[in-house]
Image (cartoon, grey):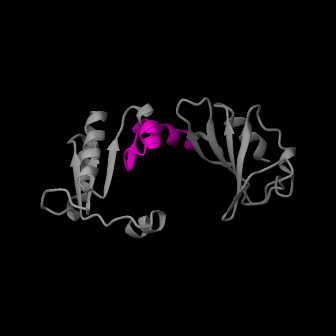
Amino acid sequence: MRRFLGVVQPGLKTVQKVIVAGAGDTGWRVARDLERTVLDDIGITPQTAIVASTDDDENNIIACLLARKLGAAFGVALISKPDYVSIINEANLLDRAVSPYITTINAILRFVRGAAIRATTLLQNVPGELLEIRIPPGSAWSGRALRDARLPRRAVVAALVRGEDAAIATGDTVLREGDRLVVFAPRGAAARLEAVFRK
């Protein structure tokens, strides 16, 4: 995990202590899993992380804000109200806000989508979702221009990812195996997109 975090978030401070605020099911599981790696001493240091998982969103937010003010390296707050997550992220209030609702919805969407659609994300307060569509090996779309795809109405290809490069896709863009399309589509359009790129 530490090696992974070093890759995805270079410069992340080393955490030597985790404080779990909240003794509910989530807090208990986090504490149990971390029990063998947490120091016994009490207090916030630059090597401290906090997981606030009480049943009150506001308490969790305040706990993380106070821990940050006292010098904690990292804070995670359990948030039950989805609207709070977008506000927290836009204002950069906390290191991480975790919403079981959003996580569950995204997990369900990933499960019910077809093989061509690899990932989905619901956008809070926006009538649509972001879909990542992969052009698999042997796809009939390899070598064809994007303009040939009959996309659902109001679906927009936001970007094309090819290898390590990302670019704006146009109608002239010729698709290749392994390409990933990031598409903004109205909710409910994923099945139609799946039918288009299933060929």
Q: Quadrant of the N terminus?
A: bottom left
Residue plotted at (54% across, 29% down): 125
Q: Is residue 27 magenta?
A: no
Q: Majority secondary structure of the magenta segment?
A: helix
Residue plotted at (47% across, 37% down): 86
Nearest to the observer: residue 89 or residue 172: 89
Relative to 177, is 125 on the left or the right?
A: left
Q: Is residue 80 above or below residue 47?
A: above
Most extreme residue toward the bottom is 3
Relative to 199, is 61 on the left or the right?
A: left
The x and y percentages for residue 92 are 42, 46
Q: Is residue 89 magenta?
A: yes
The x and y percentages for residue 10 are 44, 67
Q: How many marks?
A: 0
Q: Is residue 127 above or below residue 52?
A: above
The x and y percentages for residue 4 are 44, 66
Q: Is residue 46 above or below residue 29?
A: below
The x and y percentages for residue 199 are 80, 48
Q: Is residue 30 above or below residue 46?
A: above
Query: Can you tell which quarter of the image residue 14 is in?
Result: bottom left
What span is in magenta? 85-111
Residue plotted at (68% across, 64% down): 163
Residue plotted at (67% across, 32% down): 186
Query: Can you tell which quarter of the image residue 167 is in?
Result: bottom right
Nearest to the observer: residue 26 or residue 39: 39
Relative to 74, is 104 on the left or the right?
A: right
